[in-house]
Amino acid sequence: RPMNSIRQSSSRSAQRQHGLSLVEILVALVISLFLMVGVIQLFIGSKQTYRFHDALSRVQENGRFALEAMARDIRMAGYQPVGGTATITPIAGTGNDQITVAWSNDGVNLVTRAYSVGTGASGKPALFLQRQGDASAQELVEGVVQMQISYGEDTTAPDPDGVADQYRLAGNVVDWARVVSVRVDLLLASVQENIIPEYEPNTIIFPYAGSLNSATVTVPNRRLPLIFSTTVGIRNRIH
């Protein structure tokens, strides 16, 4: 092959071998930056979604547990076996957010349960339970912001029929001996903060709009709020 042809071929190859220009580098950096921002946003969104569902499941679990514990004790109010001689005040309310129930398993000794809402060990609100013999109430469920107890009173005259005709707050109950059911409303909030988006309101109507003593409650620090409700019949008062 002629020498001049080899030199021309080598010259053309050298001309074709170029590095990246400054513009190409900048374009590559911009594309990489957009990809990185997308990955970061995807990661943040996935993490927030996980936090939301984790907080939701914990609040739901706490709410169900609190209602089940209270309902179990409320159903027992006033119970004692046949022939029992215990003097029992089955149910009493000292305010809208406290309730005490009592019964006797052996007909002699009383079993009491008192539920209330206060500040827990973590500084967050919680549901407390005090059993007979306890020096003080013990924290039962964390995250319980508020509780409202209303009492179904049988107002049928002259003889009660065991059916609640009207629900009243503790201060409005006319005859505690005619209370046949109890409605429990609980407002819980997640212990974790920054769960709900900033654009969502941090207020909630508790218990519900139009219900007894309903009011607007502010749940701070963007914690996730949920309302739980149940109505429990007092077995020993229902015919």
Image: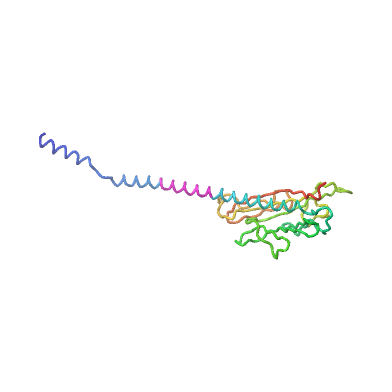
Q: Quadrant of the N terminus?
A: top left
Where residue 204 sits: x, y (%)?
A: 65, 51
151 and 69: which is toward the camera: 69
SS assignment for the magenta stretch, majority: helix
On screen, residue 225 versus residue 131, left or right, reads left
Looking at this view, name the residue that lies furthest to the bottom.
135
Looking at this view, name the residue that lies furthest to the top.
1
87 and 18: which is toward the camera: 87
Where residue 81 sits: x, y (%)?
A: 81, 53
On screen, residue 50 versus residue 117, left or right, reads left
Where residue 220 sits: x, y (%)?
A: 60, 56
Task: Indicate the quadrant where residue 93 lies.
Answer: bottom right
Q: Does the magenta stretch include residue 44?
A: yes
First to last magenta residue range: 35-50
Where residue 223 sits: x, y (%)?
A: 59, 54
Looking at this view, name the residue that lies furthest to the right.
158
Name the residue at 54% across, 50% down: 51
146 and 90: which is toward the camera: 90
Q: In this view, does 45 lie above or below 92?
A: above
Name the residue at 61% across, 52% down: 202
